[in-house]
Image (cartoon, helix red, strand yellow):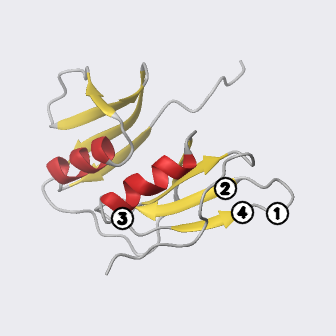
Amino acid sequence: MALERLDHAAVRTANLEAMTRFYQAVLGLEPGPRPPFAFDGRWLYCKQQAVVHLIEVAEQPQTVAPRIEHIAFAGRGLREFLQRLRDHGVAYSITVLPEWEIRQVNFHDPDGNHLHCDFGAIEEADLSDFAPE
C-alpha cells in the first residue's frame, strides 16, 4: 500500500451557512455533490476534488488546544488572493519560509480555524500583514 495524497479536511461547525459562504467567497471553493448523510453539511470542491467537508453540529465544538494546527492549500495568484482577503475583511499574516522562499499566507475562518495558503517563490506582492480596522 502507498498513500497518494491527502483527500480532504472535515470541519465540525454550528455556523454552516457562514462557513460555506467564507470558503466559497474567500477561497473560491464550490459546493458540490455530497452523500445523503443523516446530518447536514456541505462538501466544498477545488476543481474536481471535495477538499473541505463541513459537518453541521448543534453546538459549536469547544476546544482548548486543537490537535490539528491548520489546514493548508497551495495556490497561484498571490496578489489577487491577498486582495480577495482584504476585500472580505479577513486579517492575515505572511511568512516567507527560510531557504525555500515560499510565501505562506496565514488566516482564520469564521470559526477560528487556522488556514494557510502557500504560493511559490516567484509570486510577487506586498508581503505586509493585514488587519481590518
Q: Is 108 displayed left or right of 127 in the figure?
A: left
Badge 2: residue crowd in 10 Å (few <14, some 14–19, many ≥20): many
Circles 4 and 1 in contact, beta carbons < 8 Å:
yes
| Disc 2 target residue | 103
Question: Image quadrant of residue 99?
Answer: bottom right
Badge 4: residue crowd in 10 Å (few <14, some 14–19, many ≥20): some
Circle nearer the N terminus (4, 2): 4
Circles 4 and 2 in contact, beta carbons < 8 Å:
yes
Residue 55 x, y percent position in the rendering: 25, 43
Task: Return the mark for residue 98.
Answer: 1
Name the residue type under label 1.
Answer: Pro
| Disc 4 target residue | 96
Q: How far, Cα to Cα, is label 2 from label 3?
A: 17 Å
Pick the quarter of the image with the N terminus: top right
Secondary structure type for disc 3: loop
Residue 75 x, y percent position in the rendering: 56, 40
Circle nearer the N terminus (2, 1): 1
Q: How far, Cα to Cα, is label 4 from label 1?
A: 6 Å
| Disc 3 target residue | 90
